[in-house]
Image (tube, helix red, strand yellow):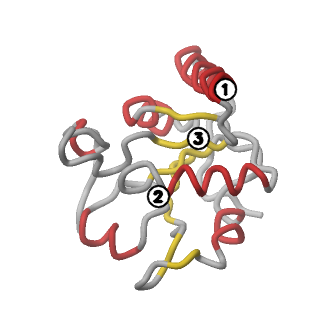
């Protein structure tokens, strides 16, 4: 297996704190994956190369709305109507290992939860959901782009 991103071999104190807090909150509420992180915390982990950021939106969403530079793409669903990508796990395994810290990002933070739950059951140990997603909730003005975090559009 080849990992597309070389992760840092050492985790900073701040990153360790972010991940520990997310894990503890996940344990307290009974999540089926490692935990939830805010867009700002996700950016910190990704920027410091302490996590792989996987965008699980469709190719069309990334092209029309935008994406985080250097993020990886593995669509959770494909087509119209959207159906589960039958190659999702295989594509994920080609980009990240089961022990890597993986951050899943979707439009609003919903598909990424389902993806995180699914792959956690398959043995991925460090999968986190990016809350609020890329676009967030229009009424709350949250999400990656509304938090003024780095993104681009072709």
Image-based side of 121 in relation to 38, left or right: right
Q: Percent position (x, y) of residue 90? A: 71, 71
- Point 43% across, 39% down: residue: 131
Residue, disc 3? 128
Answer with left or right where residue 23 lies relative to residue 52: right
* Residue 123 in the figure: left or right of residue 45: right
- The residue depicted at 66 percent of the width and 26 percent of the height is 10
- Measure the C-alpha gap from mark 1 to mark 2: 24 Å
- Image position of 14 (left or right of 120): left
Front residue of 76/59: it is: 76
Mark before the other along the chain sequence, 1 or 3: 1
Q: Is residue 30 above or below residue 107?
A: above
Number of numbered discs on residues: 3
> What residue is shown with label 2?
55
Disc sitting over residue 10 in the figure: 1
Circle 3 sits in a helix, a strand or a loop, which is it? strand
Q: Nearer the viewer, mark 1 or mark 2?
A: 2
């Amino acid at each position: 297996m080849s990992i597309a991103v070389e992760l840092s071999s050492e985790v900073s104190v701040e990153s360790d704190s972010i991940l520990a807090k997310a894990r503890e909150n996940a344990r307290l509420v009974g999540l089926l994956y490692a935990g939830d992180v805010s867009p700002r915390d996700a950016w910190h982990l990704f920027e410091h190369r302490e996590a792989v950021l996987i965008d699980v939106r469709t190719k069309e969403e990334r092209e029309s709305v935008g994406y985080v530079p250097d993020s990886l793409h593995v669509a959770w669903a494909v087509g119209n109507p959207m159906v589960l990508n039958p190659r999702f796990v295989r594509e994920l395994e080609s980009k990240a290992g089961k022990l890597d810290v993986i951050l899943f990002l979707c439009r609003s933070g919903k598909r990424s939860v389902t993806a995180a739950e699914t792959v956690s059951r398959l043995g991925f140990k460090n999968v986190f959901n990016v809350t609020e997603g890329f676009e967030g909730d229009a009424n709350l003005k949250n999400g990656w782009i509304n938090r003024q975090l780095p993104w681009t559009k072709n």
